[in-house]
Image (cartoon, grey):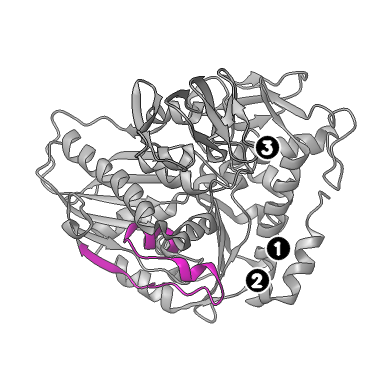
Amino acid sequence: MASSLFITFNGQSREARQGETILSALVRAGVVIAAPCGGRGICGKCRLTLLKGKVRLLENGAEVKEGDSFCACKAQVICNITVSLPVDDVIRDAVADFSGAPSVERKVRRAGVGVDIGTTTVQAQIVDLDTGEVLQTFSSLNNQRSFGADVMSRINCAREGKTRELFTVVNRQVEELLKNCIANWKLSRIEQCAVSGNTTMLHLFAGVDPSNMGETPYTPAFLEERHFEGKELSLSADRVTLLPGISAFVGADIVSGLAFIDIMNRGEDSLFVDIGTNGEIAVWKNSEKRFYCCSTAAGPCFEGAEISCGMGAALGAINRISFKKEPQMAVCPQSGALFYTTLGNVKARGICGAGLIDAVAAMRKLGAIDETGALADKFAPEDFPVAEGIFITQKDVRQFQLAKAAIFSGIKVLCKTAGLKPENIGTAYIAGGLGFFINLENAIAVGLLPGELTKNAAVCGNTSLKGAVKSLTAPEFLSRCRKIAESAVTVELALDNDFSETFMGNMGFF
């Protein structure tokens, strides 16, 4: 029998099995490495540096030399090795953050936790069940990112028999969060935990195989709310509730957000857009008392995947670019005209979705890209510089065009299906992770949102999480969620003849 092989990093060692990739070995051992393409070897973001030992590449059998980098999904161990992890993963503990320090004097008798499990980010808040006060907020990248950046990547992994692995990863992450809440606030227990998220994330959180959502007719195993005793999911909470969803790709995160805003009772036609790893849209037609909903195949570019220097909204992410210098803004290289800020005001490590929107808008104003999205000759050879070591490539612009056209066209087609015009919408609610930082003027300028929404747009952040928290203290909230799900009609954009034409017509910058 062959002797065990070990991978060492940061003073820790993990065992590798014969024949498996280094990425598989690390993920199996509970090490989180971003792999947006799901280990297919096309994104290049799971790169490690070989410090000691030998590694063999799968594609050609070549050996990697010490000091060189390689993709963990495309290589096997042939002896004990020492590697350095990608920067994003080395500092992930700094990105995971509890904001709002516990008060020594504050005594909490009963506590609950609301959780939003996003494809890219897991966010949570602990709330005092007696007063309804939010005590502390937690945010971290979703540890399932080793299995791919988007929903379909996770579903494909489940179809390959990895449902249990995906469940274990997110279950451990939420359990660690609950234990931290108990320790930080000196609690005896967490009474209630309410969980929101897209339909795939909730399936995986419950340990349910989402494979049937990977092909037509995209059938979820469940959409209704689900209730568990915490011990059923090995979680440190007495009771766990999963909020209800609408369809395979319009999930509890949308229902939770719509219920939190209470759109049904505002007496006006409304639009709700959640821009994250996926683009989900809902239109409320007040005269019909009905929601029209859809999901757009926008891809994960707004969460940093498929973008050369892209990253999520974490420390060091460029989140704002402007022509006007303000306090704590740095100057962009090779140009005195642009300035930027980063999350945490630390050195730039990449660019998140809001920063990408600003960057593309600035490139268009500067003539760095034309109306088709083609880079000007000046930048074509070396790309467009944003900060030291951070740039926008031609491929990045094309990925952005696909994503923005999908969301813009989804809004247009859904409004038309509902018999409404964007200019007649009462309020347009912009939600999701991107909703914290998005510059609406730039979003309209690049064709992400219709200009008709300018006057009545409201940026409202993570309404999925806000709804999950609200459900802990408002007895009527779950009933409101059920009514929303019952009042919803799902529009399949892929079957709509107008969508393809509208999509192609909105790829450019006009």
- Residue 65 x %, y %: 59, 21
Nearer the N terminus, badge 1 or badge 2? 1
- Left or right of 68 on screen, residue 196: left
Which stretch appears magenta?
Answer: 199-228
The three-letter amino acid code for the residue at tag 1 is Ser
Which residue is labeled 3 in the image? Answer: 358
Q: For mark 2, give the secondary structure.
A: helix
The three-letter amino acid code for the residue at tag 3 is Asp
Considering every residue shown, the one lying at the far right of the view is 377
- Left or right of 36 on screen, residue 115: left
Nearer the N terminus, badge 2 or badge 3? 3
Which residue is labeled 1 in the image? Answer: 409
Q: Is residue 292 above or below residue 119?
A: below
Asked if residue 214 is among those painted magenta in the image, a careful observer would answer yes
Which residue is at 39% across, 58% downward?
163
Badge 1 density bin: few <14, some 14–19, many ≥20, Cα 10 Å: many
Which residue is labeled 2 in the image? Answer: 493
